[in-house]
Image (cartoon, rainbow, N blue to C red):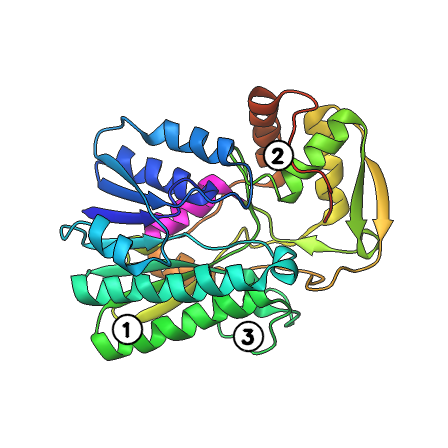
């Protein structure tokens, strides 16, 4: 297969591209290397892919339709669309960035899929679309009509646009609602990296809702296995799947497990609930298990030590990563 991977210098994008190359696929990666977070990390991820057989890279902004059409070859037959403006809290500060990347950019990818007549269009959605919907665990058919952030609203809009395009133009499409993916090479604006930095240099971490939160933490290798399983899905039409670990871990257990992995103690600053956050996430992954054999295997007891080992090797102690350690 010849596969376009957008957001290839991103966290999941780099891991997914590496896994595709390892099984012999041809990967055309695009990324705009924007500065929402450290571009040095993005370039280091990209360096792990450059030079691998079957990989080519084009720097492009998915919201620039002319550039995308010019740079993406006609040979592409699958699209793995992972590029997006991420982050719930940042959507409160810079909403237009989310409309540009997640709405206009997603539309451009749909148009590319339409006119290139791709076999399968797979894209990243988010567990954020569920808002505070209950009960847990969250099934794909749970209500998604009350997003708690603009980020969540844009990802739900992506799902609806894809449903329309798949119906109108007859191509196979799959949306993946990722649940809190973590692991080596993870984003520096997410809890594991923020917490690790603060713990190692003795700074406090802000823990919201007095620590009464729970998340479905998904190790990146499991998320990538689910992503490739979805890419290989043979069923017709547009389907949406949860990609999670299938369990809600209390936030304070996550903190204590990371402390043990790093050999460092956290100074905790408990705070009230943050706007846009939800109390708990937990994925019902039964559809993904049934349709393409998705079986996550990595608990935080196994995944966090692997993350901590990478963190120390890449950053060292007291490295300069974003401050404001919080969840």
Q: Nearer the viewer, residue 96 or 280?
A: 96
Task: Kindly tell me whether residue 284 is visible in this rendering.
Answer: no
Q: Which residues are magenta?
A: 219-229
Residue 210 position in % (x across, y down)? 84, 53
In the displayed structure image, the side of residue 226 where residue 92 appears, left or right: right
| Mark 3–mark 2 distance (CA, rounded to whole Å) | 30 Å
Q: Which residue is mark 3?
A: 144
Q: Residue drawn at (62%, 28%), measured in percent from left and top?
A: 308
The kind of secondary structure element at disc 3 is loop
Q: Residue drawn at (53%, 40%), measured in percent from left and top?
A: 298
Q: Which sits earlier in the primary sequence, circle 3 or circle 2?
A: 3
| Mark 2–mark 1 distance (CA, rounded to whole Å) | 38 Å
Q: Which residue is mark 1?
A: 166
Q: Which sits earlier in the primary sequence, circle 3 or circle 1?
A: 3
Residue 217 position in % (x across, y down)? 59, 48
Quarter location, residue 78: bottom left
Q: Nearer the viewer, residue 23 or 91?
A: 91
The kind of secondary structure element at disc 2 is helix
What secondary structure prevails in the magenta region?
helix
Return the mark for residue 304.
2
**Residues tagged 3 and 2 counted as in contact (Cβ below 8 A):** no
Circle 3 packing at 10 Å, graded few (<14), some (14-19), many (20+), is some
């Amino acid at each position: 297969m010849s596969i376009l991977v957008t957001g290839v210098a991103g966290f999941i994008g780099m891991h997914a591209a590496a896994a595709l190359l390892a099984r012999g696929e041809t990967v055309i990666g695009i990324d705009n290397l924007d500065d929402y977070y450290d571009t040095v990390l993005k370039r280091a991820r990209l360096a792990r892919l450059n030079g691998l057989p079957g990989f080519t890279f084009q720097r492009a902004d998915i919201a620039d339709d002319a550039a995308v059409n010019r740079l993406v070859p006609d040979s592409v037959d699958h699209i793995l669309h992972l590029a997006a403006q991420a982050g719930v809290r940042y959507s409160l500060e810079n909403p237009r960035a989310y409309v540009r990347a997640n709405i206009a950019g997603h539309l451009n990818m749909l148009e590319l899929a339409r006119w290139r007549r791709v076999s399968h269009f797979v894209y990243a959605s988010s567990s954020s679309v569920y808002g505070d919907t209950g009960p847990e665990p969250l099934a794909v058919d749970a209500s998604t009509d009350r997003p708690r952030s603009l980020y969540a609203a844009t990802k739900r809009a992506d799902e609806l646009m894809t449903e329309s395009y798949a119906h109108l133009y007859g191509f196979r499409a799959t949306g993946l609602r990722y649940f809190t993916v973590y692991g080596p090479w993870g984003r520096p604006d997410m809890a594991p990296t923020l917490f690790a930095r603060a713990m190692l240099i003795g700074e406090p971490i802000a823990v919201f809702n007095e620590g009464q939160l729970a998340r479905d933490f998904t190790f990146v290798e499991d998320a990538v296995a689910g992503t490739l399983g979805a890419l290989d899905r043979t069923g017709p039409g547009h389907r949406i799947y949860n990609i999670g670990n299938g369990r809600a871990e209390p936030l304070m257990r996550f903190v204590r497990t990371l402390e043990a992995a790093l050999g460092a103690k956290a100074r905790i600053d408990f705070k009230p609930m943050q706007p846009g956050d939800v109390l708990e996430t937990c994925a019902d992954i039964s559809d993904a298990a049934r349709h393409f054999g998705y079986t996550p295997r990595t608990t935080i007891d196994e995944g966090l030590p692997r993350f901590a080992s990478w963190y120390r090797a890449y950053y060292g102690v007291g490295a300069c990563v974003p401050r404001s350690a919080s969840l």
